[in-house]
Amino acid sequence: MSGSTEHKLIVVTGVSRGLGRALTDGFIAAGHTVAGVARNRSAIDELSAQYPAPHRFNVVDQAEPKEIAEWVASVIADKGAPDLLINNAATINTNAPLWEVPDSEFSDVIDINIKGVFHMCKQFLPAMIERGSGVIVNLSSGWGRSVAADVAPYCASKWAIEGMTQALAEELPKGLAAIPLNPGVINTDMLQSCFGSGASHYDTADSWAKTAVPFLLELDASANGMALTAP
């Protein structure tokens, strides 16, 4: 693992709330530059006002490959390849047995949680490979390594992240890393949709980020392919 003192360019998806917002605050407080995306216009405007250049925040729909490609190209042209890419953006289906999940909800989960990660990796990796370094962290879940009733689409998407990321790790040249990361159980809007009031028994995203940020900053090529869990 490398030291976290060097300045890094960090890309975070899903920065509007939850883990993505907490990571953004933490990375910037630690002295790093963050480029982030989310679908929520008001949240992006708020972040842009709070954290002006050299940081940048833009509205990008993780389910739209063209939007991702255009944004990634602009980031690389403006700032170069990221040192750390964190694919955090995700959605979850409303609790229901699989046969009652609406087609549109299932598609949203797949398009954002799997395809969105694929397109972010696909667009950023050529520049990272050309430079010869960089770490990609794809957020998985405890439900990417186990399952629960009523969240089958979400489980499917996170099991896919585990497999896709570990396969990608086999393909990367020396100097790069792809890591599936289980963040643990955190009290976010997503958890509240599953657990209801029971979500309050778990740490907040801000509390989680206090240990997650330094942990993520220490990751380097030696962790390539490791299925990790945040401390």
Image (spheres, grey):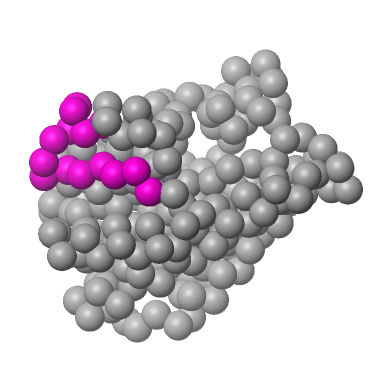
Q: Is residue 139 above or below residue 19?
A: below
Residue 25 picture location, percent across and down: 28, 32
Asked if residue 79 is positioned above or below residue 121 in the image, the reply reads above
In this view, 192 is above or below 66: above
Of residues 99 and 181, the one nearer the viewer is 99
Dividing the picture into quadrants, the one containing residue 110 is bottom right
> Residue at left 70%, top 26%?
195
**Is 48 covered by the magenta stretch?**
yes
- The reply, left or right, for residue 56 in relation to residue 20 is left
Q: Quadrant of residue 133?
A: bottom left
Q: What residue sits 34% from the left and 28% below the top?
A: 42
State the residue in front, 155 or 61: 61
**Residue stretch rendered in magenta on the structure:** 47-60
Residue 119 visible somewhere in the drawing: yes
Question: Which of 213 and 131 lies nearest the eye of the viewer?
Answer: 131
- Looking at the image, can residue 32 be seen? no
Magenta stretch contains residue 207 = no
Q: Taking 110 as reference, is 180 left or right?
A: left
Does residue 157 appear left or right of residue 88 in this picture? right
Q: Which is more toward the observer, 44 or 34?
A: 44
